[in-house]
Image (cartoon, rainbow, N blue to C red):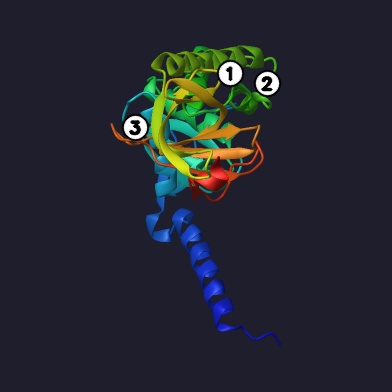
Amino acid sequence: MHTFHRAERRKFMRRLGLFLWAAQSFAPTPAQARTFRLSGPACAMNDDVQARTITAFASSSEAKNVVADICNCVALPANFEIAVTAESHVNAYATVIEHQRYIFYNQAFMESVADRHGKNWSGLTVMAHEVGHHLCGHTLDNIGSRPPRELEADNFAGFVVGSLGGRLPDATAAFRSASEAGSARHPPRHERIAAITAGWQRAARVRQSNKEQFNLITHNGRPNGTYARVVSEFVNEGAAWVEYQHGRSAFTFTEGARDPEAVYLYDRSREVWLRITTNNGAGVSVGSWNRGKADQLPDTWMPLDPVDWR
């Protein structure tokens, strides 16, 4: 029989605490349950949800953060409420019940969307599509989906994915299962891909015209082996991020991801990830880094160290 040493016991309890915290973050309780009656078809990504009675629970803080990220892309408040259901056959759908706008979502679906390390861009596209229905006023008459409305929501979703740092393939991946021919309620796949592409391209133009720039303090090596502090300017040039020092370009990065707190840049030549905070107001950003592959965002970050970083 294995006996836990004191250090092992502390490590086990920390892991158990993290597991319980994660479970409680998403798990609804019976006291939060509410019954809703869908009076008409609800707008869903590929097929409307028909009228019926459902049970829903209060949304998690993580789900609210996802919605806030989406709405912040267009500087609009959420004019709807969100709630989680036990329906496993549909990811999310938008509707109006007794003059109140709702988005109902599947719990497992939202967990994957809210995971900032393994970004589920397809899931974010679906959620942004449903948010778009509400912000564009599509749900007010409660008649469900129509092709023009779906294309408008698709365009909105493409803009959101592009604004949050997703690539065009990330935005269009959600339409792999869409009907090629379409229906009376949903347009054909090629029209939907064109709509989401146009939205993504609009976001790319906006981001390029804004010329994002963040400054942070780092270090450069000297010939005598010491390091000199320098203020580096990181500028989004559209196709890449360029680090400038004293007006001259020093290194080039590609944007790998972003969230409301930071942008994540990758230098392929050195296999180095750089995290730059973006919510700094007029102040300088805070930089941190780690080594890794281009397709995997690091789980941990280290302060910029002049020896290892450069």
The residue labelled by disc 1 is 186
Which of the 4 image quarters holds residue 28? bottom left
| Residue type beneath disc 2 | Ser
Question: Of marks 1 and 2, which one's residue comes earlier in the chain?
Answer: 2
Q: Quadrant of the N terminus?
A: bottom right
Q: CA distance from mark 1 to mark 2?
A: 8 Å
Q: SS for tag 2?
A: loop
Does the CB distance between marks 1 and 2 fall below 8 Å? yes
Which residue is at the front of the view, 78 or 92? 78
| Image position, residue 203 (x, y; %) | 47, 18
The image shows residue 175, relative to residue 287, as above or below, that is above
Name the residue: 68% across, 25% down: 176
At a point 60% along the width and 39% down the height, the residue shown is 272
| Residue position marked by numbered label 3 in the rendering | 78
Amino acid of disc 3: Ala
Earlier sequence position, callout 3 versus callout 1: 3
In front: label 3 or label 1? 3
Q: Which residue is under mark 2?
A: 179
Q: Residue 265 occupies which quadrant of the picture?
A: top right
Residue at image coords 52%, 42%: 224
Quarter placement of the C terminus: top right
Q: Seen in the image, is 47 located left or right of residue 261?
A: right
Three-letter residue code for mark 1: His
